[in-house]
Image (cartoon, helix red, strand yellow):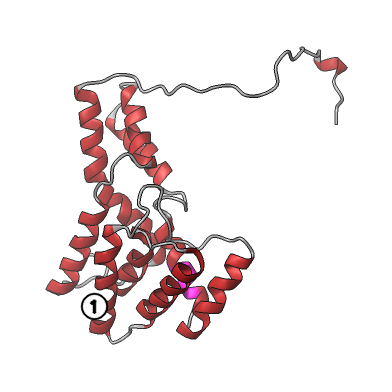
Amino acid sequence: MLLGEEPDQEAARALDVTLILYADHTMNASTFTARVIASTLSDMHSAITGAIAALKGPLHGGANEESFKMLEEIGDVDRAEAFVKDRLAKKQKIMGFGHRVYKTEDPRATHLRRLARELGERAGDTRWYEISARVEKVVMEEKGLYPNVDFYAASVYHSLGVPTDLMTPIFALARMAGWTAHVREQYADNRLIRPESEYIGPREQHYLPIDDRDST
């Protein structure tokens, strides 16, 4: 529907694979948000809206969009190494690398790397895959970080004709399956989710009337 034509079987299967890989992934930020909201016995729509808001961030679902913007900025495989090293020297993040749980390769990235190469070869344009592979090599050499699910998803979606600003919404579309299951599970055996916190700030503070406070 997005492209206005019937997709071939290979493209349809590739999209299905990405949807399966994105469908659910333990207690990530958006899933946890959905369950917290559900635990208050708010409705399904509210829980999913909160999940989408959490997913949107570039350190979560928004990483696939940011990854492709980075690939576009690099533009040519011969510029990849210098680009990565320059960013690292400036203490800037390389999008699509590292994971809070996986300390080895994200198994979803293994499948998406292959898809990115295959789709590029079928389209006769392997530039985005080649840039991605060179970035991955340099990041591993410099930082020892593996790509996560979002890194190769970027070039896969681009090869499928998905506009960059729709990459995260498609992630959300896939994750609806997982979010819905988690919210239903929360409702089925509910207990309000309320993590504890410990105050570590200054103590013995005294109230100062507003009129006596420095206006600056």
* Side of 128 where 143 appears, left or right: right
* Side of 82 where 15 appears, left or right: left
Q: Who's the residue at 57% across and 72% down the image?
A: 85
Image height check: is 101 above or below 203? Answer: below
Label 1, secondary structure: give it: helix
Can residue 42 be seen here? The reply is no
Please tell me which residue lies in front, 150 or 57.
150
Image height check: is 81 above or below 18? Answer: below
Q: Who's the residue at 38% across and 80% down the image?
A: 130
* Side of 153 where 139 appears, left or right: right
Can residue 17 be seen here? The reply is yes
Q: Is residue 69 magenta?
A: yes
Number of disc labels? 1
Image height check: is 146 above or below 34? Answer: below
The majority secondary structure of the magenta stretch comes to helix
Image height check: is 208 above or below 91? Answer: above
Image location of residue 197, percent across then percent down: 51, 23
Q: Is residue 98 magenta?
A: no
Quarter of the image with the C terminus is top right
Q: Which residue is mark 1?
A: 118
Q: Residues within 10 Å of mark 1 (few under 14, many from 20)?
A: some
Image location of residue 48, percent across then percent down: 32, 38
Which residue is the extreme one toward the left?
A: 9
Q: Who's the residue at 23% across and 78% down the image?
A: 118
Where residue 165 sits, quadrant-wise, is: bottom left
Magenta extent: 68-72
* Side of 168 where 110 appears, left or right: left
Image location of residue 100, percent across then percent down: 41, 48
Q: Who's the residue at 45% across and 63% down the image?
A: 144
Quarter of the image with the N terminus is bottom left
Q: Amino acid at mark 1?
A: Glu
Image location of residue 71, percent across then percent down: 46, 73
